[in-house]
């Protein structure tokens, strides 16, 4: 007479395999911005340059149009960040809720990889605010 024993330590956990598949699929798509609990915003320019700012220095944001592009201007205590792109409403809402962790600009040729109503950032400009600068 024999008995079958099931040892949990010898069983293969297949739930991790599904997560890896999802991560691989996500890496093939274009990531424009990430949200979550954070204290800073990380800006990634097209050339790979990165700069982050603390939400404690955040003053306000503005969403408008410049030709065909949508524009978000983010005012920090010392800097003005200008973001250009398409369908920026979700990004603006994330900024207003202090939940945006990172924003990445992409070359315009990748815009076709993103659904038409999804956020796509084509340019990020980071500039020092000058004394007496109203913009």
Image (cartoon, rainbow, N blue to C red):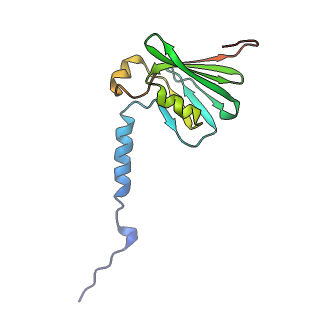
In the picture as drawn, the residue positioned furthest to the left comes out as 1
- Taking depth in this image into account, of 7 and 60 the one nearest to the observer is 60
Residue occupying the point 37% across, 74% down: 7
Q: Residue 19, image x and y in percent?
A: 38, 49
Residue 87 x %, y %:
43, 24
Regarding residue 2, the answer to whether it shows in the image is: yes
Q: Quadrant of residue 99?
A: top right
Of residues 60 and 24, which is closer to you in this image? 60
Give the vertical position of 124 relative to 36 (above or below).
above
Residue at the top extreme, as displayed: 67
Question: Where is residue 134 drawn, in percent x and y?
Answer: 70, 13
Q: Residue at x 28, y 84 (%)?
A: 3
Label tally: 0
Rendered-image quadrant of the N terminus:
bottom left
Q: Is residue 70 above or below residue 99?
A: above
Residue at image x 43%, y 12%? 68
For residue 87, side relative to residue 82 (left or right): left
Query: Is there any visible trace of residue 123 in the rendered image?
Result: no
Quadrant (top left, top right, bottom left, bottom right) of the C terminus? top right
Percent x, y for residue 133? 71, 12
Residue found at x 37% / y 21%: 111
**As rendered, which of 25 and 131 lies closer to the eye?**
131
116 lies left or right of 36? left
Residue 42, quarter of picture? top right
């Amino acid at each position: 007479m024999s008995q079958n024993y099931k040892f949990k330590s010898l069983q293969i956990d297949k739930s991790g395999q599904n997560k890896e598949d999802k991560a691989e699929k996500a890496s093939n798509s274009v990531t424009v911005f990430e949200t979550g609990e954070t204290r800073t915003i990380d800006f990634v320019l097209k050339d790979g340059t990165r700069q982050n700012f603390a939400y404690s220095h955040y003053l306000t944001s503005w969403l408008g149009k410049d030709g065909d592009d949508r524009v978000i201007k983010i005012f920090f205590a010392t800097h003005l960040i200008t973001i250009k792109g398409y369908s920026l409403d979700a990004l603006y809402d994330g900024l207003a809720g202090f939940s945006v962790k990172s924003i990445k600009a992409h070359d315009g040729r990748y815009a076709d990889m993103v659904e038409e109503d999804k956020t796509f950032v084509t340019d990020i400009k980071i500039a020092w605010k000058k004394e007496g600068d109203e913009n």
